[in-house]
Amino acid sequence: MKKPTIVLCNDDGIHAPGIYELWKSLRSIANLWIVAPAEDQSCKGMGISLPRFKHIEAEKIAWEEDGQAWKVYGTPADCIKFALDYLLKEKPDFILSGINDGSNAGRNIIHSGTIAATIQATFSGVAGIAFSCMYDEGPEKFGKAAPFIPGILDHFIEHSLPKGTLMNINFPRQDKGPVRGFRMARQGQSYWNVRIGSDSSLKGTKKYPILDSWDFQEEHAESDIYLLEQGFITCVPIHIQDLTDHTHQEAHKPFFEKLNTLFFPKESLQKSGEDILK
């Protein structure tokens, strides 16, 4: 069987242990390209280098004997653009992002650069899968998660991702007990909340402390947040093809469009041959 071609990315930076364990887990079964940020880009989300910068910096770096690795001085989304637009002559089969140092369960996906790499992949018509571990354990957590990844990849080779959908996979802590299994989950509501606080020792300066903690919500029993706490590996399909709230759109369409009577009187619309009030 032909080996799949896969681009590996992350947001923790190309020298982070998570992407190295991801590469090790797949090196024998796939043709791998490592294209990752030169520096930590955590929480940068879908940010990209704007066209006004005119260029982006990237360079090939030494990797182990069979590795093809590039570091990009930009965001995870920049890395995916660089890989698809410049490095690869054909689209890869997958873009895998991670293994992230920290959970990307719940609403953390909004800020996550790890998820952003797979969103950019999905925008570009390439299957994207993100992998993340809980913060609580030390660096050994990546090695514990890595053995599961080839099997997960095989599953998505056999069962292709729907158009416009990426897969967000999170691994539970393993220092409190073994993994209990796999669960296809729904997105939870809790998230890692960052706030701006106050500190009397900083009074008179231009500095304000950044405070962070989990904002826990009541979770559904099928949410990734809940199932991770129960020791399961979770997979949430995230659909980005259409973010429209169709229920609200249909319910409020006639009320919003009544603004036409205020700004575009029916008489003037009829004179111009347009009658959007029918």
Image (cartoon, rainbow, N blue to C red):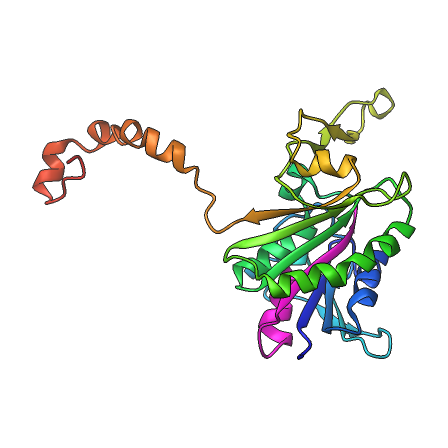
- Residue at (66, 73) in percent of width and height: 4
Residue 178 lies, in percent from the top left, at: 87, 44
Name which quarter of the figure residue 193 lies in: top right
Residue 234 lies left or right of residue 266; in this view the side is: right
Residue 61 lies left or right of residue 117; in this view the side is: right
Q: Give yes or no for residue 249 being in the magenta stretch.
A: no
Is residue 45 depicted above or below 6 in this figure? above
* Residue in the foreground of this view, choosing between 278 and 232: 232
Residue 261 lies left or right of residue 80; in this view the side is: left
* Residue in the foreground of this view, choosing between 154 and 79: 154
- Residue at (57, 62) in percent of width and height: 160
Q: Is residue 52 visible?
A: no
Is residue 177 depicted above or below 241 in this figure? above
Chain part drawn in magenta = 77-101
Name which quarter of the figure residue 24 lies in: bottom right
Residue 186 lies, in percent from the top left, at: 61, 39
- Residue at (40, 38) in percent of width and height: 246
- Residue at (62, 56) in percent of width and height: 118
Residue 7 lies, in percent from the top left, at: 68, 68
